[in-house]
Image: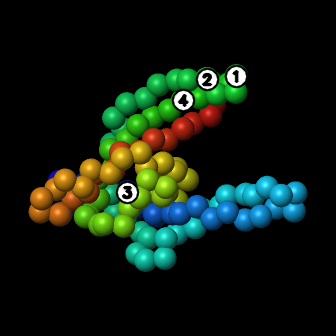
Amino acid sequence: MNIRDLDHILTIEEPWRSLEGGGGYTTTWQPVATDPVVHAAVAQTGGGQSQQAGRAQFDASYAITLRWRDDLRPDLRLHDTENDIAYKITAIDDTDPAKTWLTVRATRSLLP
């Protein structure tokens, strides 16, 4: 991986739930407290179409490479705020023995 390949600026976000008056809750996303902005290389690795509630949904999978860090979890997401794209983390490949690079597998869903 070349440092020039890290051409996306992403924010690591965590879900926050707020109670609503009717007993339910809403989820909003907030940057994580410690060092939430990362530079990353984003590559689409696949995609397809499925049906969700009778509507076509287009799903895409990605490999996102960033500098090593040990605080990512599957309940977090990576958000490209410039393009308003959210990537849901599905797997974290932390097998780099040198702990230089981290590859995150993620999905992105698009509704037509």
Residue type, numbered disc 3: His
Marks 4 and 2, how far apart in space?
Answer: 9 Å
The label number, if any, that marks residue 8 in the structure image: 3
Point out the image quarter for the N terminus.
Answer: bottom left
Residue 61: quadrant of the picture: top left
Its colouring scheme is: rainbow
Between the C-alphas of marks 4 and 3, the distance is 22 Å
The single residue placed furthest to the right in the displayed view is 22
CA gap, disc 4 to disc 1? Answer: 13 Å
Label 1 sits on a secondary structure element that is loop
**Mark 1 burial class by Cα count in 10 Å: few <14, some 14-19, many 20+:** few
Comparing 21 with 54, the one in front is 21
The residue that disc 4 covers is 58
User: Is label 1 in contact with label 2 (beta carbons under 8 Å)?
Assistant: yes
Which mark is drawn over residue 51? 2
Three-letter code, disc 1: Gly
Q: Earlier in the sequence, mark 4 or mark 3?
A: 3
| Place of residue 93 in the rendered image (x, y in percent of width and height, measured from the top left) | 27, 50
Q: Residues within 10 Å of mark 3 (few under 14, many from 20)?
A: some
Label 2: which secondary element: strand
Task: Tell me: 88 left or right of 111.
Answer: left
